[in-house]
Amino acid sequence: MKILMLGWELPPHNSGGLGVACYKMCKALAEQGVSIQFVLPYEHNQKINFMNVKSADDEAIVSVDNSYGVYDSHSYLIKTHAGAKGHRSLHEQRMVYENGVEKLVESLEFDIIHAHDWITFSGAMKAKVRTGKPLVLHIHATEYDRAAGGQGNPMVRDIEYNAMIMADKIVAVSDITKQIIVREYSIPEDKIEVVHNSIDIADTYCYDCGENDYKYLDAMKRSGYRVVASIGRLTIQKGLINLLEAIKLAVGKNPKILLLIVGSGEQYFELVSKSAELGISENVIFADFQRGKRLRDAFRIADLFVLPSVSEPFGLTALEAIGYGTPSLVTYQSGVKEAVNNFLRVDFWDAKEMANKILSIAEFDSLRDELHENSFKEYKKLSWAKSAGKLIDIYKQYNVGVNA
């Protein structure tokens, strides 16, 4: 079974969860006998032994600016093999990718095209027209999600719609996402399969945790404070304004609550200003985008992880939190609640109820421990192998066998 996988990022050059999901999913597919050619918009110099990674751009090295996000970067730094430097806009780079994919398919052997999110879809459509191969679209987020339930960018919506119409099959990361595709894009339900994202338990096992890097928060916890963490892009989709409103209410009843926000994005200055406006600046810590130990320690230091998203197709960070020992509060508008039942839940807009549930964890350690214990039992049953198996079943619908 030979798959042409079209994606926009892979670790360590990822700006969010899309690259992580693609990497883990492809590894699980490869372990079940699938051969993968993964096409990126830039050269990937990290060794990956379970698939062949190619750049769609044979003229330049492209570096994604992690201070923004994979969907909304204002520019991409270009360095050619000849040493010249310059910048491209996101849409200029998308078109370079599209044309590069169209050229690449002439020299590659594959059975199915599998493309991730709108940014690769124009290339995927070109590949299908050029080869006639079946096209599977993997929807990790729609423009509806990124616009927090609004229309968003009409050009992006058009690309998503046209690709969904042309696709042979659509994979949604949650039933919430499936229903959005049906409602907002008028796609028939029977064209859409749900395959949840998952987690590798080994990735969140702390072999040598050592001292937590957030020493200030560690000291404050020893003084009786409780830490709430939210980790992700600072965008309207993530619902952080509502979380700040909830923290304001919670701090009014228990001033020993601190909020740790880890991530970067265009909403940063708005969130800092909002914290000051609400009078909770002393209770809110902005830690910027983090990787490695600093990211792991952010999960570990928290008493509660909150995913306050307005529209969240899945939400891998809530699973990561469980792995690092922290229970989670997620919105009803998040797909991850379909994979694990033992989350606290709240509507994204209900700051009062969000505050009540934050206070319940801050004030009752037994509730915190029981919630994590129960969610961890579910967490241990998750695996990317199961998700990969569902994808292989989808591939087989097109008479493609693992040993073909």
Image: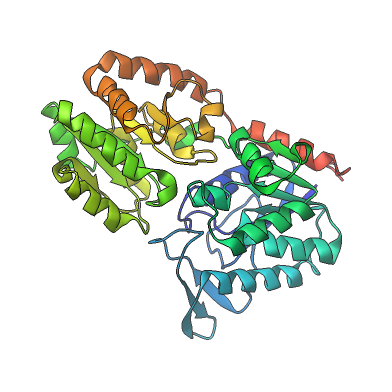
Q: Is residue 366 above or below residue 3?
A: above
Residue 381 appears in which quarter of the rendering?
A: top right
Q: Position of residue 378 (x, y in %)?
A: 51, 21
Q: Position of residue 189 (x, y in %)?
A: 74, 37
Residue depicted at x 64% and y 37%: 179
In the image, taking residue 193 as reference, residue 376 lies left or right, namely left
Residue situated in front as seen by the camera: 248 or 136: 248
Res 221 seen here: no
Residue situated in front as seen by the camera: 273 or 113: 273
Image colouring = rainbow
Q: Is residue 365 above or below residue 270?
A: above
Residue depicted at x 55% and y 61%: 153
Residue 223 appears in which quarter of the rendering?
A: top left
Q: Position of residue 314 (x, y in %)?
A: 53, 38
Labels in figure, total: 0
Q: Position of residue 261 (x, y in %)?
A: 29, 45
Res 79 seen here: yes
Farthest residue to the left: give it.
Answer: 223
Residue situated in front as seen by the camera: 9 or 232: 232
In the image, taking residue 45 as reference, residue 98 lies left or right, namely right
Q: Is residue 369 above or below residue 129?
A: above
Q: Is residue 92 above or below residue 126?
A: below
In the image, taking residue 150 as reference, residue 139 lies left or right, namely right
Residue depicted at x 55% and y 49%: 144
